[in-house]
Each structure stands twice: as structure tokens, then as C-alpha cells.
Image (cartoon, rainbow, N blue to C red):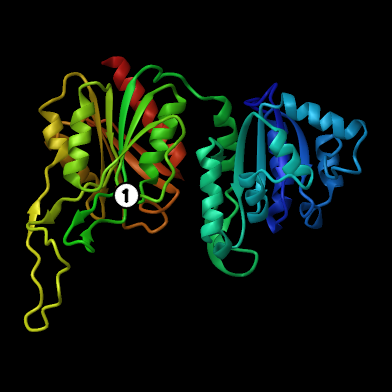
Amino acid sequence: MSGNLKGKNIVLGVSGGISAYKSADLLRLLMKEGATVKVAMSANAKKFITPLTFRALSGSPVYQNVFEEIGDDAMEHIRFAEQADLMAVVPASANSIAKMAHGLADDALSTLFVSFSGKVLVAPAMNDKMYSNPAVTENINKLKSRGIFIVEPEYGKLACGAEGKGRLAELEIILKEIIAQFCQKADLAGKKIIVTAGPTREPIDPVRFISNRSSGKMGYAIASEASKRGGEVTLISGPTNLVSPPGIETLYCECAEEMRRLVFDKFSQCKALIMTAAVGDFSPENYEENKIKKNLNGGNVLKLKRNPDILSEIATRKDGQIVVGFAAESENVFENALEKLQKKSMDLIVANNIAKPEIGFGSDYNEATFIKKDQQIRYLDRMPKTELANLLLDEIAELIEVG
């Protein structure tokens, strides 16, 4: 037993879904780490796994029936929840997520959630079509906007036989994220950090634009984790579908020139600039005020011009700031990243291979190589972007300290 959670009180919420059985294994892992765990079950969870299983593993009664349990067991759970350090809902079904998002309280789990005021971690698991439903997306975004940590599901084979995104994240990953909630560093306290994220859009005419596939997830993860570590974070975001992390100054922009202006406006005040944004290299030479019509005779010709290179310009304005860039490459990843690092006078560059479909653009996972200006190299295997974000922030905090 490593004891990372020794002395911590955790409420494990279990909702209805085929992966509910995995919560029993998570319970064992939490207790192995030294946590005291009590379980609350939704009405539907009992159709997949019995309360007796959790009672036997935890050694404590399970909170499962709001109206039948008006005695000591129910009161014990309520008192425990009031003192608990964390509530982890694993798995979280679409139904339970909707209840949490809208404050509904009609069973043991949802009632306990509404009355809980501490940290909450939620791990969704459901059919891929359900997970991609706009209503579910909206509910998850509501939870994120309230500071609830979401452990994104994985892509894989689902219980219904389909293959897609909705599979419960691996228990080891969920456990890591739970431990991380209690091991947050404060090494960026008071440090002003700029993070850029997402794509840029370069308008062609009123309805068309040039852009790229960046989702912004890596940048938003870095901004969120930097804030948790005490950083005074400004997130400069291109167009994404993501919710701004709570407590962070977020500035929005569309095109590369707008992002450049925002970065330059803030740069002199910061200790570190982390350029995760996929800034467009080119934009149309001329913007058409009206929608371009098809030229059926000879086709349409779109002339491009180079966009400003924000990182190259920043290199001439550095005054002790740490500058970090990203290199999304499809071939010769290391060589291209190293050239970019040296040419643009960065302190560190993060290289990743966008040719791998299971990482990078749109994914909740990434693998990367950190290359410092002294050519120290650190290779990192596939991991959640939140975990990669913290490893990167470890490096940045060290660079800031060295000065």
C-alpha cells in the first residue's frame, strides 16, 4: 500500500450501467491507497451490482434508499458526506449526469450529490451515441463550468457491441486523477501564465474560412492545471467547443492576427507563454465581402499570404520569460521540432505525432516528446492530456525557478 490517500474520506457514487461492476475494483484500489470509502448507489445501479458487494468490500453500509433508510445508516452517510474530502461518481450514466447538472434529487446518489459541497470527480460511461448527444455534452459542460473534474471516457468496444467513445476510463487513470486532486502543487502561485489554445480561422468570404483540426483540449487542460497550481492564468482561445475553466481570464479570438495582438498585449506581464494554439500559417490574400460564386469555366483560384509568426516575433521581445511551443508533425517529428525550437529561440518544445489517430487532435489523450533548448529530451507515452499538462508544468516551474 503506497498510502497516497491515507486519512482521506471519499464518497464513491455508483450509477446504473454495465461498467458498475468496475466500481468494486476501484473501491479496493482506493482502500489500498489508505482512503476511507463509503458507497452511495443510484436506483438503477442496483440492477447491475448488489449493495452487498460494496458493503462486504468497504465494511460499511451502502447508502441506497432515501426513504427507507431514515435510521442510523442513512444519517451516518450524510454525516460522512459532510466531512468527505471528495465525491467520485464512477461510472456516471447519462441519466445521473443529467440529474447532477440540473440539481435533481430523487434517489440516494443524486440526493447525496446535491447536498455535497466538496470536490467532485465524475467518470462518464455510456453508449457512444448517448455520449455524443448534444444534451449530454451540454450537461457535462455544465458540470465542468462548476469546477467538477471529468475523467473522459475512452474509445473502444462497448457492451452493446458497438465501437466508439463511451467506454469507462481505465481504473488506473481514474485512480491517478483522484490522487491528483489531493496532491496539487502550488509551485506557480502568483506567476502570470499565458496559454494559447485551439485553431485560428482565416476568413475567405462571409461564409468560408481556412482552419485546422485543433480541438483546443491540450491548451485548456494546461490552463486549468496551471490555475490549480496557483498560476494567474490568461487563456487566449481560438474557436472551440470547450468551456472555459472556472476562475481563469479567457480571451477569445478568431484569426491569427487577433491572437497575435492579444498575446503581445499580455506578454510583457507574464512569466511564461505556452503556445499550444495551432495558429494558421496562411490566410487569403484578399477577403471577399460577398460570397464567392462558383466559376464553372475555369475553377476558382485562392491566393494565400503568410500569417505573422507569433513565436518568431516573441523571440525578439523576450525579457526573462519562459516560452514554450508545440510541434504537431506527421513525419520527421523530432527533427522538425528541434529545428523549430532553435529557429524560434524557445526554452522548450513539445513534439507530438499527429499521424497517430488515437492521440492529438480531438483526443483526450496525447503522447509527446519534451525537448529543451539545451537539447535535454524526455519521451512520454500515451496518457490523458491533463496528466501530460502537469508533467509539462513541472518542467516550466523548474525553468521559471532557475530563471
In the picture provided, is 66 more to the left or to the right than 344? right
The residue that appears at 70% across and 58% down in the rendered structure is 18
Horizontal and vertical percent for residue 346? 19, 31
The residue that appears at 20% across and 22% down in the rendered structure is 268
Q: Amino acid at mark 1?
A: Pro
Image-quadrant location for residue 208 = bottom left
Q: Eyeballing the image, is 132 above or below 270?
A: below
Q: Eyeballing the image, is 392 above or below 126?
A: above
The residue that appears at 47% across and 27% down in the rendered structure is 228
Could one spot residue 150 in this view of the protein? no
In the picture provided, is 60 more to the left or to the right than 391? right
Q: Secondary structure at mark 1?
A: loop
Q: Quadrant of the C terminus?
A: top left
Horizontal and vertical percent for residue 127? 60, 62
The residue that appears at 55% across and 48% down in the rendered structure is 140
In the picture provided, is 216 more to the left or to the right than 55? left
Residue beneath label 1, please? Answer: 239
Could one spot residue 274 in this view of the protein? yes
Which residue, as the protein is rendered here, is positioned at the far front?
A: 290
Horizontal and vertical percent for residue 219? 36, 40
Horizontal and vertical percent for residue 45? 77, 52
- In this rendered view, identify the residue nearer to me: 266 or 124: 266
